Amino acid sequence: METAKQDITIRLEETQTIVELTNLLTPYESDIYIVNRSGGNVIEANVKSLLGLVSLRIGNGDRVTVRAEGSDAEAALDAVVQFLT
């Protein structure tokens, strides 16, 4: 199984929504996770889950780790990174 990982700083525009991110990732087979370590807590959620994304409480300036696991992990990771930065 292919795995890809990257640390990023969130830079969302006001018009971007988490629903768009979830829809963007529908074609990918890989599981994609974001780990948010801000605020002294470590929260990991599956990006394909709208409820999981909401639980992350990510905002601009947060430093997170994006991890993808599966046959198209690199492409899925790139899609998430491009959307969030």
Image (cartoon, rainbow, N blue to C red):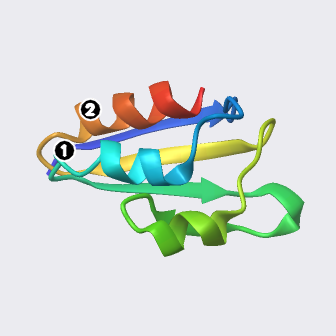
Residue plotted at (36% across, 36% down): 77
Where is residue 80? Give x, y as percent: 43, 37
Q: Residues within 10 Å of mark 2 (few under 14, many from 20)?
A: some
Q: CA distance from mark 1 to mark 2?
A: 8 Å
Task: Specify the label residue 74 is tagged with.
Answer: 2
Which tag is nearer the camera, tag 1 or tag 2?
2
Q: Label 2 is placed on what type of residue?
A: Glu
Q: Secondary structure at mark 2?
A: helix
Residue closer to the observer: 12 or 30: 12
Q: Which mark is residue 61?
A: none
Q: Secondary structure at mark 1?
A: loop
Q: Amino acid at mark 1?
A: Glu
Is 19 drawn above or below residue 53 in the view shown? above
> What residue is disc 1 on?
2
**In percent of the image, x 64 and y 72: which residue is there?**
55
Q: Quadrant of the C terminus?
A: top right
Q: Residue 58: x and y, percent?
A: 71, 53
In terms of depth relative to the viewer, which is nearer, 12 or 46?
12
